[in-house]
Image (cartoon, rainbow, N blue to C red):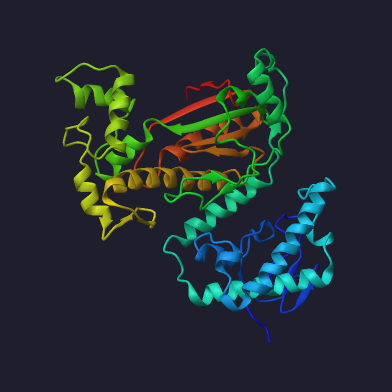
Amino acid sequence: MTTPYFQTIDDKTQCVGIYKDGTLHFDDPPPECLKTWRYSESLADSEVEYAWLYAGGLTLEEACPDHLKEDFSRCVKKMRAFRRSFELAKVDLNDHCFFDLVPHDFLLHFLELKTQITEHVFENYEKPPNYDFLSNAAKLLQQIKYQRLNVNNKDCKSLFLSHQLRRQAQQVLQMRPYIDYKLFGTVTGRLSTEAESFPVLTMKKELRQLIKPHLDWFVSLDYNGAEARTVLALLEKRQPTYDIHQWNIENIFRPAREVTREEAKTLFFSWLYNPESKALTSDVYNREKLLESYYMEGEIHTPFKRRLKVDERRAFNYLIQSTTSDLVLERAITIAEFLKDKKSFISHLIHDEIVLDVADSERAIVPEIKELFANNKLARYEVNINAGANYYELEVLRI
């Protein structure tokens, strides 16, 4: 009997094997492969649904039905033992196909259990309202996962003059240069990374000079005052066409008081993160109006169809952080699609920033990419754009 359920045996484009209806296929894929556990790059152009997204990022063990738990637990322990043995033998699974390294009978049994868990999820979980967005995001993050970062100590003498920085730099140079983002790592949807990932989100800024482009230069894009602009966009206010903190000085704080740009920035974030803050008293930033529109029965409903259970005290912060994060991720998906047939590519994402690895021969596309980033789902945001020969020494690019 043919079912729509199948599993890819590895998750790299060069390791294409499919398990379906009790059989392994290594040449032509079997027909009606429609539902699987999780996205694999070998499925890039296919119309497949992913149980992992239905389950909100649960692991196979967490989603496993009770009657399979004991058997699956044994399989997982054995699988981990195989992985540990490969690590001890210094086998790099980015260079080898995992299914070539484990016993055939064990692999068949594991994949059958995985298929039964997949079927259980599709039969018992509702399709999330933001499924398409999550699916596109998962595909982008999977692409980044198998891109090797160019990490080296060339032209980094300053790092080795300090004992502390030298030690930290040496640790970074020994790490596996791959970024493994967690799509479901935070409540708001803001990206985090797996424990074994290259620590691009948390490393000291000085150490970023160890990260070099593969092509010619890095181009970094982020929004000017992203959170403030998201508040204005959700309130359907006109976006300032210059620095938003300077705009706040001129339109929110004056004439009552004179503040510097840094003070204006601090006052805004103290208001954003503290629901009792009176740092902003202008009707322009109306917290209560947004909560009336997006906070219902203990849940924030974001423009990206996320439903976040949160108490009222943190609700506004969740709304703005989640929406801003999803705006950037959605723009990254669009930019990655634009770059599909080009040399340049997205190197990595840092919270509200997209970092591109750009070929000098394609520098003419940078203004177009800036426009793609600026025009998001809610409004046109002002963009900060910087470029440089490493990820630390980035200079303003005026285009």
The residue at 59%/54% (across/down) is: 139
Residue 155 is at least partly visible in this image: yes
- Front-lying residue, 44 or 8: 8
Can you tell which quarter of the image residue 47 is in?
bottom right
Vertical side of 169 occupied by 145: above or below: below
The residue at 50%/66% (across/down) is: 54
The residue at 60%/73% (across/down) is: 117
On the image, the x and y values in percent for residue 200 come to: 59, 35
Can you tell which quarter of the image residue 44 is in?
bottom right
- Front-lying residue, 14 or 113: 113
Left or right: 59 as drawn, with respect to 276: right
On the image, the x and y values in percent for residue 132 come to: 48, 60
Residue 33 is at least partly visible in this image: no
* Tally of numbered tags: 0
Can you tell which quarter of the image residue 171 is in?
top right
Q: Residue furthest bottom?
A: 1
- Front-lying residue, 117 or 76: 76
Q: Residue furthest left?
A: 256
- Front-lying residue, 335 or 146: 146
On the image, the x and y values in percent for residue 170 come to: 71, 26
Quadrant containing the N terminus in the rendered view: bottom right
On the image, the x and y values in percent for residue 240 come to: 29, 31
The residue at 51%/50% (across/down) is: 185
Left or right: 168 as drawn, with respect to 275: right
